[in-house]
């Protein structure tokens, strides 16, 4: 913040803050590229990278300003994770997950927010929304046990938001919820052995008879309807944004970055890489290559246009986004992910078998994109079904995550 000539404070605009944060992310790209192979080998983002992400403010993107965060918007998160994804998919994914789950933690009652962020503005929340835990009612809260898989960024989390079915005293399920638990009260089970996104360390969290007080519980059905247990603050519109749309569309940012990285790698190599068994001394001289590169570039542009169209809709309309718009957003997210996959596949066809050399980053981009695009929130058939039902006036529900 600077001071104007009249002595008043010049508060940076949202666009200025976004530009600064994206520039910081871009400045980290050389480090991310240099450490990407180590992350794959160790199956976790290197500590040095995590430290630099924290110093750049990446984990505070969606944390409330009253706790020292930037409290930006979904577009800022998407642009930052896209920039990080251009350098390393696993790092971008980990950073995105922590940032958006910090937003999720900010939907809980104020007392829970104080516990998470009050003493630690750099708190890092990760989570698993699937209700693979079970909670039973006790005085003052719930006793929760369960196993939660695919918890990206688990080694660096200070808190976890995990899904559970809640039972009353009679053993009847009365709600599906997300519960906030200190990471120190959970055990990490090493289960993330995958072909791609290896460094996200998306391992399994295990909890046994963990006490969760009432103020650290968020009802998923209620949240899906826009009802959050936090205090309503008119100066914090970010935390009235639509639950499912925020948590799903954010997944597209790293994929956009991976697509851009693949396009850059292929177009940089084509002017000097031979096209074997042809008359062309360079790939760039081939009309076939030119057409495929153009098709891939347009596919990536299509993906980006869909993602940012949906992002801007969420940022503009916040909690007023109706069901029809939410189904469109869900469909756009899955459709964009498929466009990225198709483009990356085309680009690897152009580059040839050399793309799969372990020393070539294209093979990691291909693996990371294919794993990321299979996240349950990006399954294209679910989004298309939900959107198609809306277009045809069919009211049958498909998912709470819309």
Image (cartoon, rainbow, N blue to C red):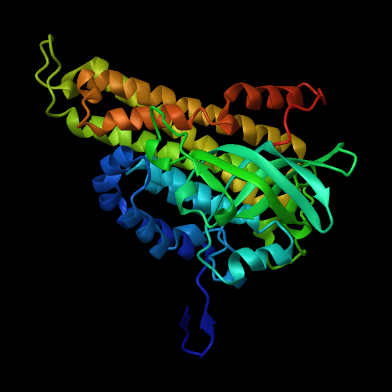
Where 258 falls versus 233 (above or below)? above
In the image, what residue occupies the spot 82% across and 26% down? 395
Q: Whole-percent x and y of residue 152?
A: 49, 43
In the image, what residue occupies the spot 45% across and 29% down? 371
In the image, what residue occupies the spot 43% across and 34% down? 301
In the image, what residue occupies the spot 77% across and 64% down? 231
Query: Within the image, what quadrant is residue 199 found in?
Result: top left
Q: Whole-percent x and y of residue 388?
A: 70, 22
Q: Closest to the observer: 248 or 202? A: 202
Residue 205 visible from this viewpoint: yes
Residue 297 visible from this viewpoint: no
Q: Residue furthest front?
A: 209
Q: Whole-percent x and y of residue 279?
A: 10, 11
Q: Closest to the observer: 311 or 149? A: 149
Where 182 falls versus 96 (above or below)? below
Q: Position of 135 compared to 250: left or right?
A: right
Q: Whole-percent x and y of residue 13?
A: 52, 67
Quadrant location, the C terminus: top right
Query: Within the image, what quadrant is residue 43 found in?
Result: top left
Where 117 falls versus 342 (above or below)? below
Q: Position of 316 compared to 295: left or right?
A: right
Q: Position of 243 compared to 292: left or right?
A: right
Q: Closest to the observer: 370 or 138? A: 138
Q: Position of 297 compared to 104: left or right?
A: left
């Amino acid at each position: 913040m600077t001071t104007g000539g009249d002595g008043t404070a010049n508060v940076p605009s949202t666009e200025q803050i976004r530009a600064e944060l994206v520039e910081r992310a871009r400045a980290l790209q050389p480090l991310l590229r240099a450490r990407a192979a180590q992350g794959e080998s160790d199956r976790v983002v290197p500590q040095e990278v995590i430290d630099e992400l924290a110093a750049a403010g990446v984990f505070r993107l969606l944390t409330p300003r009253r706790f020292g965060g930037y409290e930006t918007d979904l577009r800022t998160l998407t642009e930052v994770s896209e920039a990080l994804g251009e350098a390393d998919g696993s790092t971008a994914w980990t950073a995105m997950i922590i940032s958006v789950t910090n937003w999720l933690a900010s939907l809980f009652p104020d007392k829970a927010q104080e516990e998470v962020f009050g003493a630690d503005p750099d708190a890092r929340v990760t989570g698993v929304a699937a209700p693979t835990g079970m909670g039973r009612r006790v005085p003052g809260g719930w006793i929760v046990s369960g196993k939660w898989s695919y918890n990206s960024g688990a080694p660096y989390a200070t808190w976890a938001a995990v899904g559970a079915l809640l039972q009353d005293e009679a053993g009847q399920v009365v709600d599906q919820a997300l519960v906030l638990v200190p990471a120190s009260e959970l055990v990490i089970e090493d289960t993330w052995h995958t072909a791609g996104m290896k460094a996200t360390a998306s391992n399994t969290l295990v909890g046994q008879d963990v006490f969760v007080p009432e103020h650290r519980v968020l009802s998923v059905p209620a949240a899906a309807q826009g009802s959050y247990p936090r205090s309503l603050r008119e100066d914090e519109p970010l935390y009235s944004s639509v639950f499912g749309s925020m948590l799903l569309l954010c997944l597209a940012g790293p994929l956009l970055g991976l697509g851009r990285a693949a396009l850059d790698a292929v177009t940089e190599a084509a002017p000097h890489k031979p096209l074997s068994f042809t008359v062309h001394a360079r790939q760039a001289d081939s009309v076939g290559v030119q057409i495929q590169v153009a098709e891939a570039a347009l596919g990536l542009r299509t993906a980006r246009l869909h993602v940012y169209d949906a992002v801007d809709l969420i940022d503009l309309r916040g909690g007023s986004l109706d069901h029809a718009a939410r189904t469109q957003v869900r469909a756009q997210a899955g459709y964009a992910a498929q466009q990225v996959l198709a483009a990356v596949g085309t680009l690897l066809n152009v580059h040839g078998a050399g793309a799969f050399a372990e020393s070539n980053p294209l093979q990691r981009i291909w693996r990371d994109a294919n794993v990321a695009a299979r996240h349950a929130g990006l399954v294209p058939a679910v989004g298309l079904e939900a959107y198609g039902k809306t277009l045809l006036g069919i009211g049958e529900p498909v998912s709470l995550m819309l």
